[in-house]
Image (cartoon, helix red, strand yellow):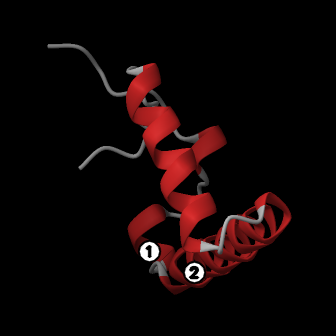
Amino acid sequence: MTDEAQPMDNPDELEAGVTAVIEACGGDPRTAIKALLVEQEILEQRIARLASALSFGYVRGRTGADRPAPACP
């Protein structure tokens, strides 16, 4: 598992995903958008909880932005 987002390269897959979300919301695009926004908020809260649960000693107080790049062999 990587920590980078994996974009959907196939436009057909993306369209199928959009259609599936809208259909799951009874065909209403506004309801589908609301559902996706709620899901995004839930995921952001989960990330925040996981980040706060990291041991300070493990990350040594560093966040992703200020971590040094790994050395190349």
Contact? badges 1 and 2 (CB < 8 Å): no
Give 44 or 21, whichever is nearer the viewer.
21
Q: Which mark is residue 9?
A: none
Q: Residue 67, position in %: x, y? A: 53, 41
- The amino acid at mark 2 is Arg
- Disc 2 element: helix
Q: Nearer the viewer, mark 1 or mark 2?
A: 2
Is there any visible trace of residue 5 in the rendered image?
no
Is there any visible trace of residue 58 in the rendered image?
yes
Crowdedness of circle 1 by 10 Å Cα count: few (<14), some, many (20+)? few
Real-space Cα distance between discs 1 and 2?
A: 21 Å
Name the image quarter holding residue 65.
Answer: top right
- Location of the C terminus (image quadrant): top left
* Extreme residue in the right direction: 30
How many discs mark residues in the rendered view?
2
* Extreme residue in the left direction: 73
- The amino acid at mark 1 is Gly
Give 29 or 54, whichever is nearer the viewer.
29
Name the image quarter holding residue 22.
Answer: bottom right
- Disc 1 element: helix
Work out whether 56 lies above or below 33.
below
Q: Residue 51, position in %: x, y? A: 56, 73
- Residue at 47% across, 47% down: 17
Q: Which mark is residue 46?
A: 2
Q: Counting residues from the N terminus, which is met first, the one under dot 1 or under dot 2?
A: 2
- Residue at 65% across, 74% down: 26
Name the image quarter holding residue 72.
Answer: top left
- Residue at 44% across, 74% down: 57
Q: Residue 7, position in %: x, y? A: 46, 30
Q: Is residue 6 left or right of residue 32?
A: left
Q: Which mark is residue 57?
A: 1
